[in-house]
Amino acid sequence: MAVKPKIVRLACWVVLAGLAACGGGGGGDAGGGGDTRTTSGLLPAAVTPGATLATDASVFRPMRDQATWTYRGSYKAFSGADATAYTNTVTQSLTAAGEVSESSTDDAHAGSASQTVQISAGTVATPATVDFTGLGNAEALSLVELRSPVRRGEQYTVLDRHYATSNYDGDLDGKADAMDVAIYASVIGKESLSLPNLPTMDTVLVDTTVVSRLQYSSNQQFSNVVTLTRQVWYAAGVGIVRQRTTGPNAAGSGIEEADEQIASWDGLESGLGAMAITPTFVPDSSALFPGQRLSAGIGFQAFAFADHALLLTSAPDGLTPGVTASELNLRGEVTGTRQLDFISSPTPYQAVFVQHAGGLLYLAQDDPNAGSPVVKVTKLDAHGAVQVAVGSIAIDLSGTVFQPTIKNQFAAAVDGSTLWVMWPRTWVNVGVGFVNDLVLQAFDFNGQPLAPEQLLMRASGSDFFLISGLSAGHGSALATWMRTTGGVKELMMTSASVTAGASSVSLAGGFSDGAALVAPFSLADGGALLWPQLPFTTGVTGVGGLRLDSNFSPVRSTANLGDERIASIAAYRAARALDNRVVLLGDVSLELLWPDSADTDLVAQLHWMDTSAAALASTPVSTVRFASPKYAVQLVFPDRVLVIGTAMPPGYYEGLATSVVWLNRGTSLP
């Protein structure tokens, strides 16, 4: 592996390429005389620095032991040549405080390289020793990348030198030529950078330039100036996100160009883009299913906790009864498993898993075939361990009506220590017939009512209702449902609290059963509704969405609900929310991940919106496009999304796999 810093190695190529163009090396005795110059004459005059772009340069060069930056490169050997795609992986190893060793697998498509990067006294620099003259007199340089404060237009001078003699003879007179070399960096300014598969990022662009020439001993004339430029785009909190190098190729036959754009950054605790798909194997040290890969089986569910995820699947051997509860770390790796033999399936009939901060509640209808109005509750901790006797807690949803039954799926959600249950109840009104009630009520985790039940709708005859979704958080519950009265269908929204009861409003009417697709989300400040497409918006592209303020009043951008479109998101298969962030995961499709990819991949898009008081239709959307598992769900954490689905990475059989998508696009600049 070469040990010269990257830019120094390339700078040497500039000199060598210039010599090749001028006639060669191997100078003899020094020629000329009276050469008193000490500077190159190639350094441009510095300008007065402009606005401060950042007070601390170190934010553009994070140092993380074993952090990895992966770049997608495109190389052209000369102008007009076909481009060659390549990958350059840069890995850091911490060597001292404020210092890392940085290795590259294929820097500028010129092979492996390494360098030391140091941050000291507000300056980011790479130390180097280089012998430009070829006389064996190496000199120490400090290749400055950035200096605090980072100011637009500032020029960093690395080298400005006239060498009175060298080992080169460009004019072929048998005498050594003099030589000029200048290296300098210029802060060009702030630039909004859009790269393939990643959100738009705020960056700072810095151009580093190496210029050289010979001064012929025969006539004191100068050779042509040979130039190498490396443009580097830095994103705060991420590092180098793009670098483009242009200069003479090694053969001296033309100008080569290597353009490297970041594909992903794995900073271990933070990152950018998406990590590679990883199969979910149980650790070999596990007492249960050691070394086996988790399988989707008949379905799976997953839940995000503060420092891990809990994944519920069928047993990986396909034989053991019950549900396998596997703990995953935040990188999607299985760390442990346990078996829950009291549950027949990870997606059971007439039962739901409901997450709270400390674990799960498993709610199962006591006798679904008979329509029992009793729901049994089992408490699980965040690792899947049973906390109380299975089914020892019962919630009676009978109310005060005659012969109540529950024959359709109920919904449940948790807000803090409050369990909200929404259910359809059928009962017999003597002399009238069957009546259907839609009911919402709050309970504690021991099944005790915290408030009276709220009757949202009582339907008989041809009138009916359909539950769409239930969410809870930040002191309230939020539900969406469809009601049909007198043949007219309406999309309904209900907000409720323990103290204030429930309030329902009609959002729209006059359409078909598509309203069942409207999903509610409780946010830190109000809520949101999302839907793939409402029936009366056929042919209109974009996902539908409605922001609800802190009073759950719709924040509208238009009077027509069907026109509340998030145009940049074509579709989604799953949506989650955390605080005020909404995350949508699209379906996979077989396509090229990169325009120059040789093969297609299963590719999905992950979108997120940091909502505010504005309408969702005008809320900025960030998107990462990535190679994704199929039939996936997403778990949202503050800094990342863990995508879980089925995949068959090269060398593995089909089974569950994970990918981490980082919720980061660099820290915004002033």
Image (cartoon, grey):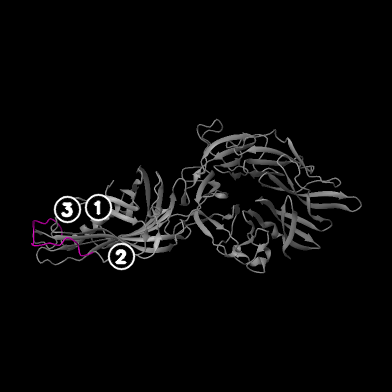
**The disc label shown at residue 134, or none:** 3
Callout 3, which amino acid? Gly
387 and 519: which is toward the camera: 387
User: Residue 665 appears at what percent x and percent y?
Assistant: 47, 56
User: Gap between marks 2 and 1, in whole Å?
Assistant: 32 Å
394 to the left or right of 255: right
Describe the element under mark 1 as helix, strand or loop: strand
Q: Which quadrant holds residue 230?
A: bottom left
| Whether residue 220 is visible | yes
User: Residue 300 appears at what percent x and percent y?
Assistant: 61, 44
Callout 2, which amino acid? Ser
Mark 2 vs mark 1, foreground winner is 1
Q: Which quadrant holds residue 147?
A: bottom left
Q: Which quadrant holds residue 324?
A: top right
174 to the left or right of 151: left
Magenta range is 24-42
**The disc label shown at residue 79, or none:** 2
Tell which circle, 2 or 1, labels the residue nearer the N-terminal end.
2
Callout 1, which amino acid? Leu
